[in-house]
Every structure is written in C-alpha cells, then in structure tokens.
C-alpha cells in the first residue's frame, strides 16, 4: 500500500502531469503531420498519373480555405442584418390616418372617363419579339441537337457565369455547384466564322495539337478528350440517344493524307481498232473501291506495306507528325525500325514507349488486313 501511495504521489506532481500532457500533444501533432504529408503525396501522385495540374502548396490551400470560411460567415450574417433593420423600422412611429384622409379633393370623373376612351381608341402597340442570341437548328429523331452561337452572343451568355464552390469535396448531382477542390483543366471556344474549336490549356491557346509544342500538355489534352468521349457514350445510352461513333472517318480529307483523298477516275483512252476474238471469260472482275479508309496499296515486301500504313497513320496522328518513324526491309527480308535517327532490329527494342506502342498498333492493324 505504501508503494502504491508513493507512485500516486509521483504521478500527481505538477511537472510530471505537464510533461505527460506535452508529450501527448506533440504526439498527436506529429501523427497529424504524418497523415497530411501522406495524403498530399497520394494526391500528388494521382494528379500526375491522370495528367491533372500539379497540387498547389499548403499555404495556397490554407488561404483559399480561410477565404471560403469568411465568405460563408458573411453570407450567414446577412439575414441577421436584415432582421435587425426590420426591427429598427418597426419602431418608427406611424403617421395619423385622420391627417392623411382629411380634406381630400374630389376626384374628376369626367377627365378620367375621357382618358379611358383615348386609351381604348389608340392603336395597340406592337411589341417587338425578343431577339435570341442563339439559333437552334431543326433536329430530327435520332440526331443530336446542336446549338450555335451567333456573333452577337458572348461567352458568358452562352455558358453562364462561373459555378459556385461547395464546402464539400464531393460533387452532388443537381446542386449546380462544383466541389471545393475542383480545378479548371480546359476551356473551349467555337469560332463562329468557320465553326472550328479553340482550346485553352495551361495558359496556351491552340486549335491543333501541333501548336502546343509540349508533349506533356498534348498527353493531358488527349486524356481529357478520351474521358469526354467515354462520358458521351455512356450519357447517350442513359438518355436513349444513339451512341456516337467516334471511330468513324469524319475528319477533314486534307488532314488525312493521300489514302483518305477521294479517288479520281482515270480516263482510259479507247482503242482505235476493235478487239476481235477476245475471250471475256478469262478477264478478272474490276476492283471496286468504296469508302475513304481502304487498305493501303499493295507492295512487293512486307516492310513496304507496313511502311505505307505507318506513314498514313502518322499523318492522322498530330502527336507523331513531326517525328521520323519508318519501317525498312533488310536484305534477308526481315524488317528494322528507324525512329528519330536510331535503328532497331525489333520493335520491342524501341526506347520511346509511345513510339513503340504506336508501331505495334500499326503492325497489328496490318496483320488484321491480311
């Protein structure tokens, strides 16, 4: 019993209690710091993997959080201020009704009737129809409705003002608010003169991927477009609209290369002397070319066929238009890869991952055509 009492006396000492409280406080502070560091590191890796803008520093996030808290408190204070002003107005003494209604002049009914007759005889005013800044094209069943913006309309009229930010980090459907941690990754405008799209990302404005001059920015743009295409497919199925086919050949012919250009008919000169005794049963049927995305012209070697298909796909892909990528034939009828001045005996030896996957996809397409 004496040992227990001495231990209790030891624990009840002031310095021991303060030391224990300080240790617990700094321990919780350390655990909180470790949790925040791990969370920011995971968020930074996620943004880098998905091609999103880098995570702002902790000071910027803390400043934005304090700003939102101050704005919310100001909004909550507005009803209280309105109630206070209403209470103040209610204390103001009201005027005497007898003073307001005494010695009023008699109304002139004759002039009033004359004014009513003049109003009835006047021609009705023509109310101009409100001019809308948007022209909606007629749509048929199974087609998407497209709204076109005229020259007089501005971006704020068409898209609307910036949405409000909610205090939550989770998007709520139908709330017309964006999460607190949402970031703007892309802006899109339409040039009403020719209908082309103008994109802004990371402070750069462009119409084609080739204008970016930034490989990382191009990857982010392609990833965003892929996400939008997936959203359009799923959304079309959800609302009962036809699923859009983004794989169809609907791009401009001049940007697709020689294979996508319309086939021009060849004028074959008629023979001056009629053919006699011709055996038409041995003649091969004519080749009928349909569509714009046909197989490449036949070549004597496998490498030549793959090279033609590769160059065609390079012209369609703006990311690789300025790269030197070729498939050559070796003397032993094997193929070799030439990428940016370097030669590889096999496609798996290509160092650039994007180039390697692109060449592999072209080879698989060539095999499927055979």
Image: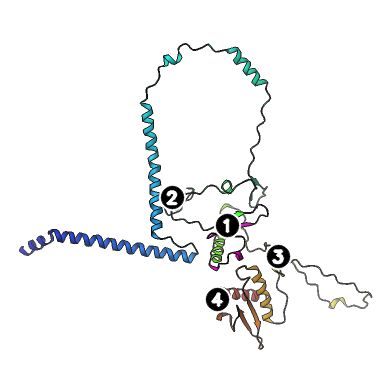
Taking the spot 81% from the left edge, 76% from the top edge, the residue there is 284
Frontmost of labels 2 and 1 is 2
Which of the pair 169/200 is nearer the observer? 200
Taking the spot 73% from the left edge, 75% from the top edge, the residue there is 297
Label 1 residue SS: helix
Q: Residues within 10 Å of mark 4 (few under 14, many from 20)?
A: few
The Cα atoms of the two marked residues, 2 and 3, are separated by: 46 Å
Question: x%, y% of residue 176?
Answer: 49, 48
Taking the spot 42% from the left edge, 63% from the top edge, the residue there is 43
In the drawing, does residue 83 fall left or right of residue 312? Answer: left
Q: Which residues are magenta?
A: 191-216
- Between disc 1 and disc 4, whose residue precedes? 1
Tag of residue 352: 4
- Between disc 2 and disc 3, whose residue precedes? 2
Write down the residue under mark 1. Answer: 232
Tag of residue 254: 3
Name the image quarter holding residue 340.
bottom right
Write down the residue under mark 2. Answer: 166
Question: x%, y% of residue 211?
Answer: 60, 64
**Any magenta on residue 212?**
yes
The Cα atoms of the two marked residues, 4 and 2, are separated by: 43 Å
Which of the pair 126/60 is nearer the observer? 60
Does 84 sit above or below residue 346? above
Frontmost of labels 1 and 3 is 3
In the drawing, does residue 61 fall left or right of residue 349? Answer: left
Question: x%, y% of residue 267?
Answer: 85, 70
Question: Which quarter of the image is occupied by the N terminus?
Answer: bottom left
Q: Are marks 3 and 4 in contact (CB under 8 Å)?
A: no
Question: x%, y% of residue 299?
Answer: 72, 79
- Between disc 1 and disc 3, whose residue precedes? 1
- Between disc 2 and disc 1, whose residue precedes? 2
């Amino acid at each position: 019993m004496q040992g227990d009492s001495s231990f209790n006396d030891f624990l009840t000492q002031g310095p021991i209690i303060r030391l224990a409280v300080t240790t617990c406080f700094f321990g919780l502070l350390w655990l909180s710091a470790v949790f925040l560091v791990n969370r920011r590191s995971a968020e930074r890796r996620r943004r880098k993997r998905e091609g999103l803008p880098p995570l702002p520093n902790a000071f910027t996030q803390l400043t934005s959080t304090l700003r939102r808290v101050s704005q919310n408190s100001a909004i909550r204070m507005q009803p209280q201020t309105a109630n206070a002003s209403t209470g103040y107005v209610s204390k103001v003494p009201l005027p005497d009704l007898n003073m307001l209604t005494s010695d009023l002049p008699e109304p002139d009914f004759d002039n009033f009737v004359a004014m009513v007759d003049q109003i009835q005889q006047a021609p009705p005013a023509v109310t101009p129809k409100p001019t809308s800044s948007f022209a909606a094209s007629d749509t048929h069943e199974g087609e998407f409705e497209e709204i076109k913006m005229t020259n007089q309309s501005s971006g704020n009229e068409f898209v609307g003002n910036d949405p409000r930010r909610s205090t939550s980090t989770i998007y709520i459907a139908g709330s017309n608010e964006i999460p607190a941690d949402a970031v703007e990754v892309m802006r899109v405008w339409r040039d009403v003169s020719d209908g082309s799209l103008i994109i802004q990302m990371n402070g750069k404005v462009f119409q084609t991927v080739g204008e970016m001059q930034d490989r990382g920015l191009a990857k982010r743009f392609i990833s965003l477009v892929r996400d939008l295409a997936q959203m359009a497919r799923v959304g079309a199925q959800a609302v009962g609209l036809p699923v859009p086919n983004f794989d169809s050949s609907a791009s401009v012919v001049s940007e697709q290369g020689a294979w996508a250009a319309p086939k021009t008919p060849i004028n074959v000169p008629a023979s001056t002397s009629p053919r006699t005794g011709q055996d038409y049963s041995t003649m091969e049927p004519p080749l009928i070319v349909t569509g714009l995305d046909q197989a490449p012209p036949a070549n004597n070697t496998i490498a030549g066929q793959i090279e033609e298909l590769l160059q065609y796909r390079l012209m369609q892909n703006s990311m690789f238009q300025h790269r030197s990528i070729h498939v050559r034939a070796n003397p032993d009828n094997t193929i070799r890869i030439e990428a940016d001045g370097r030669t590889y005996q096999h496609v798996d030896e290509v160092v650039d991952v994007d180039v390697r996957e692109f060449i592999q996809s072209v080879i698989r397409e060539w095999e499927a055509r055979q």
